[in-house]
Amino acid sequence: MFDYTAPAELLKGRTILVTGAGRGIGAAAARTYAAHGATVLLLGKTEKNLNAVYDEIVAAGHPEPVVIPLDLEKASKEAYDELGAMIESEFGCLDGILHNASILGPRTPLEQLAGENFAKVMQINVNAMFMLTSALLPLLRLSNDASVIFTSSSVGRKGRAYWGAYAVSKFATEGLMQVMADELEGTTVRANSLNPGATRTDMRAHAYPGENPLNNPTPDEIMPLYLYLMGPDSTGVTGQAFNAQ
């Protein structure tokens, strides 16, 4: 596991957006960021799940988060612009984004992968991530120390059979991170990718149905790297590909 001990108030006063915040790694990251002082913007498709995370954070006495229901498959440019306007109005700037939301899609040979399935994975995992980043970049630039974390995968760094659109989308994620980091070098905004590795999530169980989930760490156990990359201790670190495990 990545070795890092975060100060208790590492993210105090910061506003951080987490996509896919309703469950799994996204929910764990949202709770963890809030526990270290951040106001977390909980973005996801299922409002019920987001509200549950909201309740957990408030019950723990952490800064009150904001629930943002948004379907990344269907969201329009106007929806992203409205989100940016809301964040600017309420918070003035944005200090970080964790791009966590993604879907697995069918695990099948490429020659059997339906075009509509490929397009859906790319829409959620790549297109929406780009549009969201593009809309919010002006707010990130207003921060004294902003961090964007792109969630990658081992199959996005070396292709593997039967991982289809998901693997392709994660290669695109790495490319987006690298281009963004290079363009923003010398600014207050940094960008890095993070491969969580085998983690006890619903997506992992779907991808490896025969695997014993207890052999994998929980999302909470891989949070040290999520904290390091989002906090000021990683200032100046950009364009890098990290592994949480």
Image (spheres, rainbow, N blue to C red):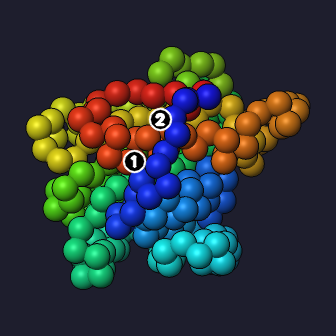
Quadrant (top left, top right, bottom left, bottom right) of the C terminus: top right
The answer to whether residue 100 is above or below residue 95 is above
The answer to whether residue 64 is above or below residue 224 is below
Q: Is residue 149 visible?
A: yes
User: Of residues 90 and 77, which is closer to you in this image?
Assistant: 90
* Residue 60 coordinates in the image, percent (x, y): 64, 72
Helix, strand or loop at label 2? It is strand
The residue wearing badge 2 is: 194
Residue that appears at 43% across and 64% down: 38
* Residue 222 coordinates in the image, percent (x, y): 62, 39
Q: Earlier in the sequence, mark 2 or mark 1?
A: 2
Tell me the amino acid under the disc marked 1: Met
User: Of residues 143 and 72, which is closer to you in this image?
Assistant: 143
Q: State which quadrant residue 107 falls in.
A: top right
- Dot label at residue 230: 1
Q: State which quadrant residue 218 falls in.
A: top right
Packing grade of label 2 (10 A; few <14, some 14-19, many >=20) is many
Residue that appears at 58% across and 35% down: 196
* Residue 109 coordinates in the image, percent (x, y): 65, 25
Q: From the viewer's perspective, is 200 left or right of 103?
A: right
Residue that appears at 55% across and 24% down: 154
Tell me the amino acid under the disc marked 2: Leu
